[in-house]
Image (cartoon, rainbow, N blue to C red):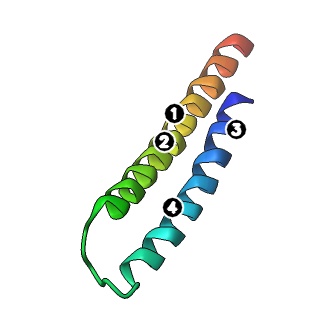
């Protein structure tokens, strides 16, 4: 169950941070990388980490369940 929460939260964070990054890049300043863009890139990185950690936790839980059934 924990892995579902991690994956869902990661997808939600990725959607929000990607939308905000697209808005920041297409803004009037253009493609200038300041503090805001670094903050948003960090948020996208954190979201990716949550998604991948949730997927690996899901694989581990599935593997442990199949070992327990055998």
Please report contact status of discs 3 and 4: CB closer than 8 Å, yes or no.
Answer: no
**Mark 2 touching mark 4, by CB under 8 A?**
no
Return the residue at label 4: 17
Q: Reply above or below: 45 against 50.
A: below
Residue drawn at (44%, 69%), measured in percent from left and top? 21
Residue 2 x %, y %: 69, 29
* Local SS, label 2: helix
Mark-to-mark CA distance, 2 and 1: 6 Å
Q: Name the residue nearer the viewer: 34 or 3.
A: 34
Q: Quote the CA–CA distance across marks 3 and 4.
A: 18 Å
- The picture quadrant where one finds residue 61 is top right
Please state if 15 lies on the left or on the right of 32 as rendered.
Answer: right
Cα–Cα span, label 3 and label 1: 13 Å
Q: Nearer the viewer, mark 2 or mark 1?
A: 2
Q: Secondary structure at mark 4?
A: helix
Q: Which residue is mark 2?
A: 52
């Amino acid at each position: 169950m924990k892995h579902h929460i991690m994956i869902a939260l990661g997808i939600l964070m990725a959607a929000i941070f990607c939308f905000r990054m697209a808005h920041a890049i297409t803004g009037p300043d253009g493609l200038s990388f300041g503090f805001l863009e670094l903050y948003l890139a960090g948020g996208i990185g954190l979201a990716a980490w949550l998604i991948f950690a949730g997927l690996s936790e899901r694989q581990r839980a599935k593997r442990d369940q199949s070992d327990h059934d055998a």
